[in-house]
Image (cartoon, rainbow, N blue to C red):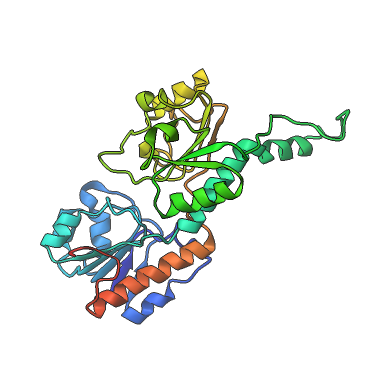
Amino acid sequence: MKTVIIDGYTTNPGDLSWDVYSRFGEYIVYDRTETTPNDELIIERIKDADAIVLNKNEITRDMMIRCPKLKFICEAATGYNNIDVKAAEELGIAVTNVPAYSTDAVAQHTIALLLELTNHVGIHNQAVKDGEWFEAPDFCFTKKPLTLLAGKSIGIIGYGAIGKKVAAVCIALGMTLNTYSSDPKSTLESDFISLHCPLNDDTLGFVNKKLINKMKDGVIILNSARGGLINEDDMSAAIKSGKVAAYATDVLSIEPPEKNNPLIGLENFILTPHIAWIPRETRQLLIDICVANQESFLAGGTLNRVSPL
């Protein structure tokens, strides 16, 4: 069985091993596969593959038809909207994904964003490096006010595995919990709101001017889910007006960002480059589950199968 890993670099930039795929036979790893006219490059690379593993590249009906040996596709991520699943089902190609592998990592990153907004560790560390503590008249100084989380409220939109993990940490810090699925009104009136819902037709641009206007003045919003949940023009306006006191996110609607993104450069906006999922331990687990999916397929099983069910 020949396996082709199409865009392996983000999963494994060199600190892990792909050699586990040798158990299936021949395997080839491409760090990246650029989009070309008529998708000729990706088709050239997968035309004689029995199985492919991918993260962000798109796999269309036309690609599947032009690669008649293809029997198995593994999405090395949880979301698989980059694969034409309906076409795969019609063509008898199994599609799997990797659910819940990054729960702990994404929850941890969400809390990191939360604490950066309340304790401003980065700003104060830089101030010390710039020599400001040497000149301080007192034994301490602050560049921005610090906020105590105990007694504050956290609203969770998307109360799945990651949302529950974030909620548990916030409760341990003394915060009160509101969940959108149980009480939308109280959730939108929370001091902090954290997004953990999937991106689909119903949630695209979900956080827009209308929803923000229902929130508490000075709300702080966290997003470790998907950039497309946010109407970024509306969010930019809300930050500038002070309606949103701060927005911290690991994701944008377009990645890498366009230079005219309305959020980048704003004060009270924190952005990390889609790294919540990326600890080495999490990426190793991702590879392990991808391999398990393929082993299951070869044995006639349906581990993490999304199509055909």
Q: Residue 109: give x, y in percent of width and height.
A: 54, 49
Q: Nearer the viewer, residue 114 or 294?
A: 114
Q: Residue 108: give x, y in percent of width and height.
A: 54, 52
- Relative to residue 205, is residue 243 drawn left or right? right
Location of residue 59 with respect to 131 vertically, above or below: below
Q: Residue 130: give x, y in percent of width and height.
A: 77, 35
Residue shown at the point (49%, 22%) measured from the top left: 243
Residue shown at the point (46%, 45%) measured from the top left: 224
Q: Nearer the viewer, residue 156 or 176?
A: 176
Q: Is residue 195 visible?
A: yes
Q: Residue 245: give x, y in percent of width and height.
A: 54, 27
- Relative to residue 131, is residue 240 drawn left or right? left
Q: Is residue 276 visible?
A: no
Residue furthest top as drawn:
241
Residue furthest left as drawn:
90
Counting the numbered discs, the total is 0
Figure quadrant of the C terminus: bottom left
Residue shown at the point (72%, 37%) measured from the top left: 124
Figure quadrant of the N terminus: bottom left
- Relative to residue 140, is residue 225 drawn left or right? left
- Using the rendered view, name the quadrant where residue 24 is placed: bottom left
- Using the rendered view, name the quadrant where residue 64 is placed: bottom left
